[in-house]
Image (spheres, grey):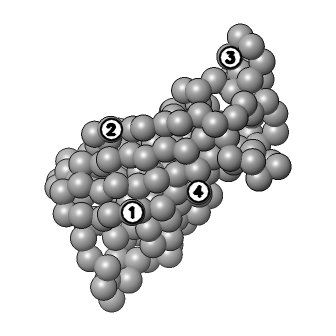
């Protein structure tokens, strides 16, 4: 991890464009809208035909996906370009039922280590009501599950360099 290097804004812009086209994001309608140092923001426009449980509210698994996704990207910013992640643990507490419109997730990195990162996220509805809270522990994988691996898997070429002088 190197907090001294400057992250290339073009890398972040192109990364978000490509990640938002990934199969799982497309399936659920997840949009990564911001990545900055130790922070990520993810949004989801609720579709009752995709996201609702049989009782007419958003399924808890949607909150879990949003929390783990936002936490992953909150940890991404300062990690080396050849580092990837895998989730070790996700803890989700559903606090209220969401039914319609948009969910917004704000995630922050609590601890950005060389081997493990801990992040937390809060899911809010359009009324700014907290509907879920969660944490993710992410194992840093040097040289494995990197962004370059993801891009190749999706059929894309590389991105602009992550760090600039």
For the residues carrying marks 4 and 1, which lies nearer the camera in this image?
Answer: 1
Of helix, strand and loop, which one carries label 1?
Answer: strand
- Determine whether the residue tagged by mark 3 lies in a helix, strand or loop: loop
Q: Position of residue 68 (x, y in %)?
A: 45, 42
Residue 18 in view: no
Residue at 19% of width from left, 63% of height from top? 114
Q: Earlier in the sequence, mark 4 or mark 3?
A: 3
Q: Which mark is residue 106?
A: 4
Please name the residue that numbered disc 2 is placed on. 89
What is the C-alpha distance between the residues marked 2 and 3? 24 Å
The residue positioned 58% from the left and 63% from the top of the image is 34
When asked about the image quadrant of residue 30, the answer is top right
Quadrant the N terminus occupies: bottom left
Q: Which residue is mark 3?
A: 53
Counting from the top left corner in percent of width and height, residue 92 is at: 49, 36
Residue occupying the point 30% across, 64% down = 112
Residue at the spot of label 1 = 110
Alpha carbons under labels 4 and 1: distance apart: 13 Å
Of the residues under marks 3 and 1, which one precedes in the sequence? Answer: 3
């Amino acid at each position: 991890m190197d907090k001294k290097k400057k992250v290339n804004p073009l890398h972040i812009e192109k990364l978000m464009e490509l990640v938002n086209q990934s199969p799982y994001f497309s399936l659920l309608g997840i949009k990564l809208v911001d990545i900055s140092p130790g922070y990520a923001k993810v949004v989801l426009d609720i579709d009752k035909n995709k996201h609702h449980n049989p009782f007419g509210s958003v399924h808890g698994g949607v909150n879990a996906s949003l929390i783990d996704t936002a936490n992953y990207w909150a940890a991404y910013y300062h990690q080396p370009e050849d580092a990837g992640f895998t989730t070790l643990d996700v803890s989700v507490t559903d606090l209220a039922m969401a039914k319609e419109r948009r969910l917004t997730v704000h995630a922050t990195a609590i601890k950005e280590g060389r081997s493990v990162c801990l992040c937390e996220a809060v899911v809010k509805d359009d009324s700014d009501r907290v509907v879920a809270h969660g944490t993710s522990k992410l194992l840093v994988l040097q040289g494995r599950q990197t962004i370059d691996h993801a891009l190749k898997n999706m059929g894309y070429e590389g991105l602009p360099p992550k760090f600039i002088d």
